[in-house]
Image (cartoon, rainbow, N blue to C red):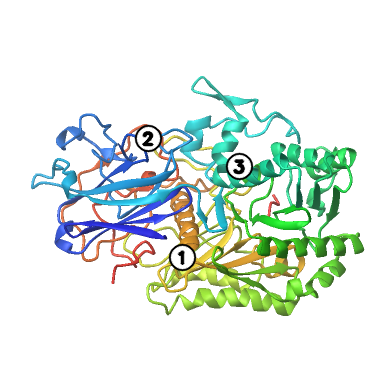
Amino acid sequence: MAFATGSKNGFSVKAYVGDNKTLLAFNFNDPARAKSLAGFTIKCQPPGQVPYYLMNFLQFQDPSKHAQVATEKPNSTANAPIQKYRWVHVTGTSHQGLSPAVGNYTYTVTPRYFDTNQSMRALDETQGATVTVPVGAFRKGSLALGFTRGYMQSEAFAHHFGAQTKIVPAGKPLEYDTGAQAGTNNGQAVTYAQIYEWMGSTARQQVFAILNSVVADKSLQLDVFAYDLDESDVVKIFLQLAAEGRIRIILDNAKLHLTQKDPKTGQMVTSHEDQFTSLFKQQAKAPADILRGCFGRFSHDKIFIVSKNGTATQVLTGSTNFSVTGLYVNANHVLVFTEPNVAAEYSKVFEQSWKILTQFPKTPSTKASNAFSATPLASQPYAYQSASVPKMSITFSPHTTSDVNKILGGITTRIQQEHSASHGSVLFAVMQLTGSQTPVYTALNQIYGDETVFSYGISDAPSGTHLYAPGSKKGVLVTGKPGKTTLPPPFDQVPSPPGHEIHDKFVVCGLNGSDPVVYCGSSNLASGGEAANGDNLLEIHDADVATAFAIEALLLVDHYNFLDRYASPKSAKPPKPNGGTAGTPSVSPKKGKAKNPAPKKTTPKKKAPKKSTAKKATTRKSAPKKKKSPARRTTAKKRR
């Protein structure tokens, strides 16, 4: 189920199901219902718990001039309704703590109105529309998804853990006690494990669910492709399995993962990957083994393959490196297929890669790339569909030039098809959009200018940034690396994270169409990478999966659109606050907008609801007339 609907008196709510989060979209079937609109109050009923109102980050400048629910805070949506036509609720933001309930959630959304004196009327929940949807980690049949929480540069991180708290111990050792204290926040001790659980989110849950299952069942074996490798608890499990003779690892040995001289100090610095290799060889018991290699450039896959008695049963893949930055700084995704046929195909790729990298041990090796690209595993897409797995195809690189052009050209063509599609849309989070002549980068860099397509994109390296502009029908393209920001009062300042924040590589096309598709995996969607890297690129045709990825894109763009607006270039003054227009394109009512201006709201000094669009919510009473959002389906380091 990609979404559920509810309606009341001409007002409708759609709830789109994501990964531990819900996108709520609002609409009126009669423009007259938007007259004197003050916003929307959202009440949430978790399974088996007391209901609560979602929190806004804005509140009225003088709440006493408006009807208030005395038991609620001034910035509760009961007292400060959300002035946007869409909202993403992330459980555990302001209620339920860091381990929120899973199950069916019921949302009641009530339109709020001003009287003739511009005072908000009392809440009347009998006018609200109600919808119930499942909330929890995403799973559909044999496919599960997981996403990291790529928001270290946020008030939520600072409020939970302290803006100055480090995410690794001094000296950045390979092995350390993650239960140790990382810092303090408001006088309370904060551990690395607490940071990791929160930042790693469902991606971390999926990674450790597999690792712990292999540890617990001595009949299971694990094959691993790893690029960056320094997550301490992952390392400990790998070494334990090595000592038990139950793991094989292909670990990248490109220059950035080798011991080398620090140009600043002149001292030799042993890479984490070299440290791990040494420990592995010391502790391994046959048939456990490790192979270092990198094809023509990188061994860039991030994969677990679980086997039982020699038969592959489960595979984890995606963009998430098994490292501190990969899991706890970057925005990333994982996919888990508990499907023997899919796992078997990945197992074939592992065996073939091991064979070729052993045959061509001197790396980087063009010969190794050429050898793999000549195999059927590289030249023929793996197409699969079953009762428990959606229609999909997977390509494994390195590829020949001909195959690279065919694969990336196919993605580009699909993006371009949205220009002529009814309610066409392209939403994406791709680490870089420069440094390659790939047609995919060209298409994604340019699509923002097409006013017929709803485009919403983010990259750490776009060719340019194009922030949301009220009234414009152009798309949005933002950077995930705003650098140092200077946020206006009353916002707290946010930390500047190390490395990439956007490490994802996914593109969602046609969310409102008959064939929504998401491209994802470890591939950077670049011509050079597809020709020289060991990578896997998935193409999944499924509305539920596409919706989950689309919600992630919306959240990332919303968050960094706001930060980009307050980035502090070296030679420029910080931008002035603009009344909240750093927010996202809201889903407009079907016709028109409210005529009376909303009384001014202010932002209280309190914790920012994590990953919600609250801190970017516009203070305007309704959204500018913009192209329809995908949320409206029924309206007419080096780190790679």
Q: Is residue 111 above or below residue 509?
A: above
- Residue 114 is marked as none
Residue drawn where x is 71% and y is 29% of the image: 170
Using the image as rendered, state which of residue 330 and residue 338 is in the foreground.
Answer: 338
Disc nearest the viewer among 3 and 1? 1
The residues bearing labels 3 and 1 have C-alpha atoms spaced at a distance of: 28 Å
Q: Nearer the viewer, residue 21 or 421?
A: 21
Rendered position, 164 above or below 394: above
Please tell me which of labels 2 and 3 falls first in the chain. 3
Tell me: residue 202, above or below residue 521. Answer: above
In this figure, which residue is indicated by the disc labeled 3? 328
Q: Amino acid at mark 2?
A: Pro
Mark identifier at residue 543: 1
Find residue 552 and report its horizontal and vertical position in percent. 48, 54
Q: Front-most of 484 and 4? A: 4
Q: How many marks?
A: 3
Q: Quadrant of residue 537?
A: bottom right
**Element at badge 2?**
loop
**Residue at (23% x, 29% y) in the render:** 71
The crowding category of the residue bearing disc 2, from other C-alpha atoms within 10 Å (few below 14, some 14 to 19, many at least 20), is few
> Looking at the image, do the residues carrying marks 3 and 1 touch, with CB atoms under 8 Å apart?
no
Mark 1 is on which residue type?
Ala
Q: Quadrant of the C terminus?
A: bottom right
Q: In whole angstroms, how far apart are the C-alphas of marks 1 and 2?
A: 40 Å
Task: Kindly indicate the quadrant of the structure image that contains residue 55.
Answer: top left
- In the displayed structure, does residue 204 sit left or right of residue 283? left
The label on residue 490 is 2
Residue 138 in view (yes/no): yes
Tell me which label, 1 or 2, sits earlier in the chain. Answer: 2
> Quarter-wise, where is residue 261 in the image?
top right
Under mark 3, the amino acid is Tyr
